[in-house]
Image (cartoon, rainbow, N blue to C red):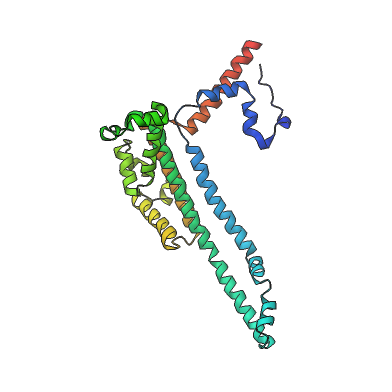
Amino acid sequence: METPRVDFSKLDPANWEEEGQKDPLWRAINGKFKDTPTILDLTFLSRMTDTFLFVRDLLDVLHAAGPQIVRRKMLGFPDMLREFASVLPDDGQTYLTKVMEHQFEKKIERYEPWLLNQGLVMLCTALDVFFEHVVDVIYRKKINLLYRPQESRGIHLRDVVRLGSVDAVVADFRAEEVRRFGFLDTTKRLEYLSNRCQFDTRSLFDLTTFKQEVQEQLKDFNSKKLHTIYDDRHSVVHNDKLPISRVEELEAIKDFFDKLIWNTAREAERKHDLLLETSRTLMIVRLYDVAQKKSQAESS
C-alpha cells in the first residue's frame, strides 16, 4: 500500500513545527526521545552559520548603503554652517562641507572591522555556550561524574528542604558546576574536559576525518590557535582592539569552530554513549517511516 500523499497546500509554513505535532504517530515517536540527554550538535552548527551569515549580510548592506549613510549624517550640516559660519565665503563653506563628508566616510570605513570583530565575539560566545551545554548533558547522563567526595560533603539537609527534592538538589548542583566551568579560561576548560569529563582533548582538534581540502585550509588551527582566538576576543571586549580585518579570517574561525563542535560531540558520544541530535533526527525519521508502514499494513 502506497503512503498517502501529504496535501501541503493545507499546511501553514509559518507553523511547520506545530504541523508535525498534529500527527499522533510523529508526536509519540518524538516523545520517546524527549527526556534522553542529547548533544545538540546541529543546533549549534546552525548557530555558527547564522552568526557568520548575519555579519556577512550586514557587510553587504553596509557596502551598498555607504553613500546613503554619509548623506544621512550630512543632513542639515550645510544649513548649520551658513547659520554659524556666515562670515566664511561660499567656497570656504563648501570646503568645510567636503571636509565633513570625508570625515564621515572615514568613520564609515571603521564599521566593517567593528562588525567583523563583533562577529568574532559572537562566535566565541556560541562556542562557550556549546561547551557548557556538553558538560551539562554529560552530567545529566552520568550523575556519578558530577560529584567528588569533597563537594558532596557540601550538600546539606537545608538544601534538600529548600529545593524540595533530591532531584532538585542535583539539578541545582549541576547548574552551579556548569557555571563554574563557564568561568574557566581556555586552558582550564580543556583540562576540565579531560579530567572531569574523561575526554581525550587531542581528538577535539583532529581534522584527519575531514576532507583533505578542509585539512589543508585549517592546517594552522589547533589548540594553540584556539587560545589565540580567545585572546583576540578578550582584546576586542576589554581593550577595544580590532584584530580581525577581513571577512575571510572570520569565516576560517567559523569553520574551525564547526569542526570543534563536531569533534566534541563525537567524543561525548564515544566516551559517554550520548545521543547526538544528528543521530536522533535520523532515528526519528526512520522509526516514523517503519511505524507508518506498519500502521498502514494493519489497516489494509
Q: What residue occupies the far left of the structure in this picture?
A: 150
The quadrant in which the N terminus is found is top right
Q: Nearer the viewer, residue 245 or 173?
A: 173
Residue 291: image x %, image y %? 57, 18
Q: Where is 1 relative to 36, above or below?
A: above
Identify which residue is drawn at 55% across, 67% down.
Answer: 109
Residue 286: in sight, yes or no?
Answer: no
Q: Is residue 13 left or right of residue 160?
A: right
- Residue 20 quadrant: top right
> Which residue is painted at 42% across and 46% down in the image?
128
Q: Which quadrant does the C terminus fall into?
A: top right
Residue 182 in picture, x, y percent from top left = 39, 45
Pick the front one: 4 or 93: 93
Q: Can residue 11 be spotted in the picture? A: yes
Residue 282's place in the image compared with 255, above or below, is above
- Residue 266 image offset from top left, x and y in percent: 40, 35
